[in-house]
Image (tube, grey):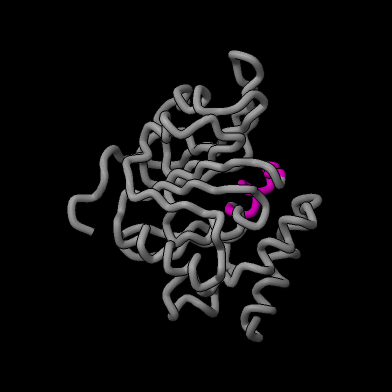
Amino acid sequence: MTGDDREGFAAFLLRLRGKGAVPKALIAAIEATPRRGFMAAQFGSIAWTDRMLPIECGEAIEGADIQAAVIAALAVEPGHRVLEIGTGSGYTAAVLSRLAARVVSVERYKTLAEQARQRFEALGITNVIVRHADGSNGLPNEGPFDRIVVWAAFESLPRFLLDQLSSGGVVIAPIGPEEGEQVVAKLTKVGSRFEREDIGIVRLQPILPGVAAVI
């Protein structure tokens, strides 16, 4: 890490620990993943901010704190198969790759999918598969998954994703209106029903069907 990175990372850890215990495996996975390498050079010095920062295709990388909170809430175990909807920069998939057996990440923008693949290759990450595809309905033909995380908002509970979960599996997704705040909900599959726990507030773009026509 550079000096800026070390200072930013230390401040980030202080914020996290101020909110409660942080799993050691998660801290190790985050520390091993060069966050500034997943964003434009001009934002490198503020890579550990809790603010969203712009990336290509009009998208954004979520703040470091909410990303860490979501990954912690997923409680990923070494044997798990994880589905991520919304690859974005690829940062969260890279962190998850150090915690899970396999990560399948779906991205509607070809540019973002290709950039993420290049970053994973450069880092020697081999257990992340990037799909340039429509993830608005998950990946019904590739489940079940032990964990599913979504980085775009649904207006209502995405119950169809529960069908793509293994028993005891977890979905984390923002739920709420297109405009304004959404609640990040953790849904744990218990038999044919689910238990819900709300873990934060975000402002993310709505889930969009299809793939981008050009970019």
Identify which residue is drawn at 61% across, 20% down.
194
On whether residue 180 falls in the magenta region, the answer is no
Identify which residue is drawn at 31% across, 40% down.
208
Give above or below for 113 relative to 133. below
Residue reaching furthest to the left: 213
Identify which residue is drawn at 45% across, 65% down.
53
Q: Is residue 206 in view from this perspective?
A: yes
Q: Quadrant of residue 180?
A: top left
Q: Quadrant of residue 166?
A: top right
Number of residue marks: 0
The reply, left or right, for residue 27 in relation to residue 4 is right
Give above or below for 28 relative to 108. below
- Give residue 13's position: percent from left, percent from top: 73, 64
Identify which residue is drawn at 64% across, 54% down.
68
Q: Main secondary structure of the magenta part?
A: helix
- Give residue 85's position: percent from left, percent from top: 44, 44
Q: Nearer the viewer, residue 141 or 106?
A: 141
In this picture, which residue range is highlighted in magenta?
A: 67-77
Give above or below for 49 relative to 176. below
The reply, left or right, for residue 211 in relation to residue 115 is left
The reply, left or right, for residue 27 in relation to residue 113 is right
- Give residue 27's position: percent from left, percent from top: 73, 61
Q: Nearer the viewer, residue 123 or 92?
A: 123
